[in-house]
Amino acid sequence: MTASQTSAESHTGDAQTSADPQTTGAAAALAAAEEIVGADRVTRGGPGDNTGLFRQRDTAATVAPRTAEQAQRVVKAFAAAGGEVSLHAYSTGRNWGLGSRESATDNVVALDLSGLDAIRDIDVAAGWAVVEPGVTQGHLAGLLADTERMVNVTVSTAHSSVLGNALDRGVGLRHQRVEDLVGLEVVLPDGELVHVGWWPEGDRKTPVYPHTLGPSLVQLFVQSNLGIVTGATIRLLARPEALRVVRLNYTPENLGPATALLRRWVAQGLASGVPKFYNPTAARGYGSAPGQFLAHVPVDGTAASVAALSAIIADEAVKSGVFTEVSTTDATDPDAQHHEVTSLVERSYLGDPDVSDRVFEQKMGMRADQLDTDLGFLFFLPLLPFTAEAVVTAERLLGQVHAETGILAGGTGNVLGDDLVDLVVAMKFDRADAQAAHRALDRLYELFAEQGFLPYRLDVDHHEWIDRVGGRPSARAFARRLKDSLDPTGVIAPGRYL
């Protein structure tokens, strides 16, 4: 029996257990945390349910600081405990399908950073904002409304963390969000607060450049447990003057030819941002007819360039005979069948995540605050070569997993360039089917790895895959030497990647 099968069964069959620290150092650290953040901000036990129905870890308590200074003092208190219990930090906790707020290992205290929700500084003209982990994409986007700048939003809820998603290499509608990180404020395992990358310098204006002189340190804290990030400088993007999404539908037998055309448009510079394609299961959330694939091809720039480029794409799409439906006017024509959803999609590409969450709720079937208690939901996130062969193979593998387990998976391809696709495999399931869903997740890892389609993000029950697909052993050994050097007593808990 696999680890994820065991975890699904244990979660659905047993109540959560959380062991209070028994040792003097750990008890003293929790007592100190109560002094620092207030007794009302420390609760015994873990962070609660998770929509993936992963095994709930042994979590002694949850500590919720309000400021970076409080978070730093909490880390110092646990450093004094000498590794008797480790800290597991999360932002708003909406890491759905990968574990939500759950840690990868047992014997932890959760550090809830959602209370660090300040936008400390912002310069629209220069294109940056300093944000804390609890700042949501809806909050930041709201401040930028009607300005020449925008935030690189995702299609998740507007109430998800900008920083938390970027640190796990989430994908926005303009590019991977890690590209938006230009500076980080980090609490190291001994409690020292450091700033790496680019930070505003008061009266002196310097251009935004994340690497500085010497080794580039920002990426050291992405997908790592080398420190706890309490703030970041985020790049704000120039808002396009105009944008249009070309909507294309096609049948399964045309998946290969449609993929080849989409790649050509991207490679030749006709498309902008992150074009997306959806298999029939995922496409239903955007109003497509049963059995139809869907592609959204964004085009942005000046009004004249958008009109010209979208017309070129539409003309080539029609002449190809590959597509059952081609439209460039769904967002502008109030009588169009897909007017509302395409309008919301275009607004998202322009940096508006829709605080009402209409598209999100249409796809998920419920509000964001219901997911962890009412829905079964898992993510699998592999990278594919952007070729017709690879995309067709990936869809075949999803069909194989459905046949083996009965779990139907939606597949959304995020086109990250001429040669790369981030495939978001989403599985919604009845909670009574948790065992089958976790079997399906295990099979996805196995089958896609056999094809060389490796995950770029991991869930809490597959963190051991870092040693199977996380690069050469020498690189993994070097990363662990860094961890041992910075955190010899394990103040910060082992994560999904290190």
Image (tube, rainbow, N blue to C red):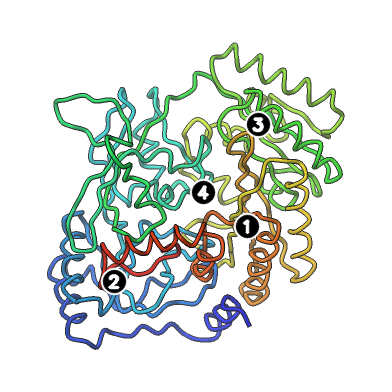
Question: Percent position (x, y) of residue 118?
Answer: 26, 46
Label 1 sits on what residue type? Ala
User: Which comes before the other along the chain, label 1 or label 2?
Assistant: 1
Q: Residue at x 23, y 68 (%)?
A: 41
- Say what amino acid the circle numbered 3 marks: Val
Residue type at the position of mark 4: Ser
Quarter holding the N terminus is bottom right
Q: Is residue 301 left or right of residue 270?
A: left
Give me the disc on residue 297: 3
Whether residue 371 is visible here, answered yes or no, is no
Mark 3 and mark 1: Cα distance apart in space:
21 Å
The alpha-carbon separation of the residues under discs 1 and 2 comes to: 33 Å
Q: Nearer the viewer, residue 474 or 319?
A: 474
Image height of 391 relative to 270, above or below: below
Residue count near mark 4 (Cα–Cα under 10 Å), binned few <14, some 14–19, many ≥20: some
Q: From where the camera sits, is residue 237 visible?
A: yes
The residue beneath circle 1 is 426
Cα separation between marks 1 and 4: 12 Å
Residue occupied by mark 2? 490
Q: Nearer the viewer, mark 1 or mark 4?
A: 1
- Three-letter code, disc 2: Gly
Pointer 2 and pointer 3: residues touching (CB < 8 Å)?
A: no
